Amino acid sequence: MNRSFHKSQTLRFYDCSAVEVKSKFGAEFRRFSLDRHKPGKFEDFYQLVVHTHHISNTEVTIGYADVHGDLLPINNDDNFCKAVSSANPLLRVFIQKRGTRRLSCSTCSAIILRKKCSF
């Protein structure tokens, strides 16, 4: 049987050391990957996120959706490592300008509901 895989599928199935990251800022989504075993420091991740979204001159707050759909902050090395290690297979990251209302995770709830209500 011959199967064709897209690059992201190949990465997901054959490279268990990579974590796919899907980040959302406003209405924009970006995707990139990190090494699960050597994710680096939070500050490097923060710089990568703001550079990827072209918001280098903006102070932002970063959070992620855990396996239960709860929105948790990524604001230090420990939280960042926990987020990367718990990603299975995707780390969903939500970015919001600092000083605005706290991040809500209605998107996270919709994701969890969609998974539970699969037909």
Image (cartoon, grey):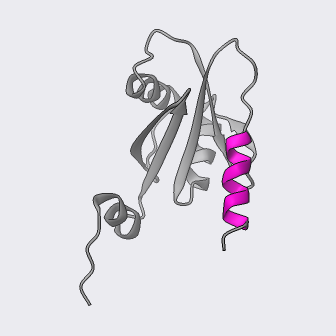
Residue 88, above or below 93 = below
Where residue 1 sits, quadrant-wise, is: bottom left
Residue farthest to the top? 57
Q: Position of residue 50 (x, y in %)?
A: 45, 23
Mark yes or no: residue 67 visible.
no
Closer to the camera, 39 or 19?
19
Residue drawn 56% across and 60% down?
88
Residue 89, above or below 99 = below
Residue 90, above or below 119 = above
Is 80 on the left or on the right of 108, as rendered?
A: left
Is 34 on the left or on the right of 115, as rendered?
A: left
Q: Give the range drawn in magenta.
A: 106-116
Is 81 on the left or on the right of 51, as rendered?
A: right
Q: Position of residue 113 (x, y in %)?
A: 73, 58
Main SS of residues in magenta: helix
Residue drawn 57% across and 54% down?
87
Residue 54, above or below 44 = above
Residue drawn 43% across and 47% down?
38
Q: Where is residue 64 in the image (x, y as percent from the top left)?
A: 63, 40
Closer to the camera, 61 or 35?
61
In the picture, the quarter occupied by the C terminus is bottom right
Residue drawn 24% across and 85% down?
2
Mark yes or no: residue 118 visible.
yes
Q: Where is residue 15 in the image (x, y as percent from the top left)?
A: 36, 64
